[in-house]
Every structure is written in C-alpha cells, then in structure tokens.
Image (tube, rainbow, N blue to C red):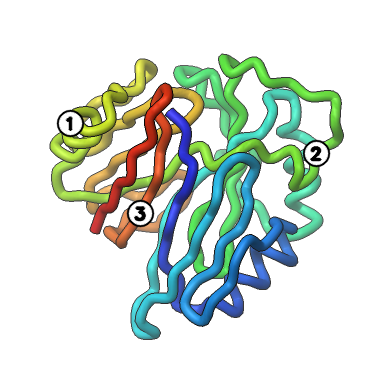
Amino acid sequence: MEIKELTLLTNNLTETKSFYEQTMGFNKIQETETSLSFAVGSSELIFELSEKNQKPKYHFAFNIPINSLNDAMNWALQRTSLIETENSFITDFENWKAKAIYFFDNNCNILEFICRKDLNNATDKPFSVETILNINEIGLVTDQPLQIANEIIEKTKTEYFAKGPKREDFVAVGNDSGLFVISNPNRKWYPTQEIAEKWKIKGKIKVTDYEYELEFN
C-alpha cells in the first residue's frame, strides 16, 4: 500500500507554509487562500484551512532509507527539536523491524522519520529532504478501530499489517510501504503525552494497480 496523497487540517496556513517550506525544505506544489500542498517524495501532503477556533493535531510518518536515520537525526536537530524517547532520540521497534525519530511541527502534529529494514532501500546519498521517500503512516482516530479497519480492508483490498497490532483499541492496516495506524481516542500518541484526537483526514492510496480515495471525520 502506498499513500499517494494525505490531506490534513491546519488553523494557520502561514505558519504551516513556513515550517514545511522553510524548516523542512519541501517543494510547494500549490497554494490557495484555503490550502497548501507539498511534494514529499512520491507522496503529496496537503493542508486545508480549518476554523480558527479549532486546533487540529495529527500523527504521521515519513519513510526514509534504512541507513539514513543517524544522518536524519543530525539533519533534524539543525532545524528543530527532537522528542526524547527513553533517554534516546531513536526508538527501535523490534517487532516491526523499524527505527524512528520524532518531532513536532508548528501545529503540534507529531512527525516521524521511520526506516523499515524489510524495505531494503539503503542509499549512498547523504540525507536531505530529497531522500525522504514518501508519507509512510497516518494515525486515524475513531471510537471503533477494528470497524474502521475492516471497512478500509473491504474497500481497498489491503489487509491487516502482518506485524501487528490488531486490538480493539489499536490496529494497523497496510504494509511496510504504507500504513493506517488506527487508535481509539483514549490512547496517547507515542512517544508523547498527546491524546489521540479525532480530526478530518482525506487520503488517496494505491494498492497494487488501483487507487482509492478515502475520507475520515
């Protein structure tokens, strides 16, 4: 599964533009009075303007080459602050054969650089915004995670993530190339104390040779 487009909300397009265009260095694709879009590897990241009294917050991840995490950590530290996890910036997810680092954007979204061993995508290039491969994960929040998971699977013919988890309160759908990480609203997004919040999300995913548009509220 590939996440081709991801559309999120922001209550401040000016600050969002500054973070993603200047701090991160992503190339802007389009800008209107109510939306912004950026190229993120083979994915497109889109922000739409919410009402000013709203403060949408999400958790999503960018996929990077498996041998780039230390370089990515140094790159990120030159631009922002990383979130510490158990006395280190790097988290090792042994069951997923993955490692990740985390940081916040201007909206207090939790962003993640993740590298997945089984993708076997090492590079000889130094880390830069150009080596970010795509959007790899998006966190969905719903009262019924398994129900939403089954609806996604039925519509898109993807499947539960083989490496788990599959629980009533937390489940992953997709594969190493792209994941929906689905939580109920009572959990905190790792590695922070931020409670998972339900906000509008739109996405376009590719499964084998077919593309599907999905929307969650």
In which quadrant will I find the C terminus?
bottom left
Place residue 125 in its image quadrant: top right
Is 43 left or right of 146, judged from the image as shown? right
Residue 39 in picture, x, y percent from top left: 63, 52
Query: How many C-alpha atoms fall within 10 Å of the one at disc 1: few (<14), some, or many (≥20)?
Result: some
- Residue 87 seen anywhere in this rendered image of the structure: no
Which residue does the numbered mark 3 point to in the structure image? 202
Q: Earlier in the sequence, mark 3 or mark 2?
A: 2
Q: CA distance from mark 3 to mark 1?
A: 17 Å
User: Which badge, 3 or 1, comes first in the chain's sequence?
Assistant: 1
Q: Nearer the viewer, residue 202 or 71?
A: 202
Q: Residues within 10 Å of mark 3 (few under 14, many from 20)?
A: some
Residues at marks 3 and 2, CA–CA distance in whole angstroms: 29 Å
Residue at which label 1 appears: 150
Mark 1: which amino acid? Asn
Q: Residue furthest front?
A: 209
140 to 170, vertically: above or below: below
Q: Is residue 171 left or right of residue 122?
A: left
Q: Which mark lies nearer to you, 3 or 2?
A: 3
Viewer-closest of 93 and 172: 172
Q: Position of residue 195 (x, y in %)?
A: 33, 57
Q: Are marks 2 and 1 in contact (CB under 8 Å)?
A: no
> Which residue is located at x 59 percent, y 29 percent?
99
Q: Position of residue 26 (x, y in %)?
A: 69, 56
Residue 207: x and y, percent?
A: 39, 27
Residue 179 in the figure: left or right of residue 25? left
- Label 3 sits on a secondary structure element that is strand
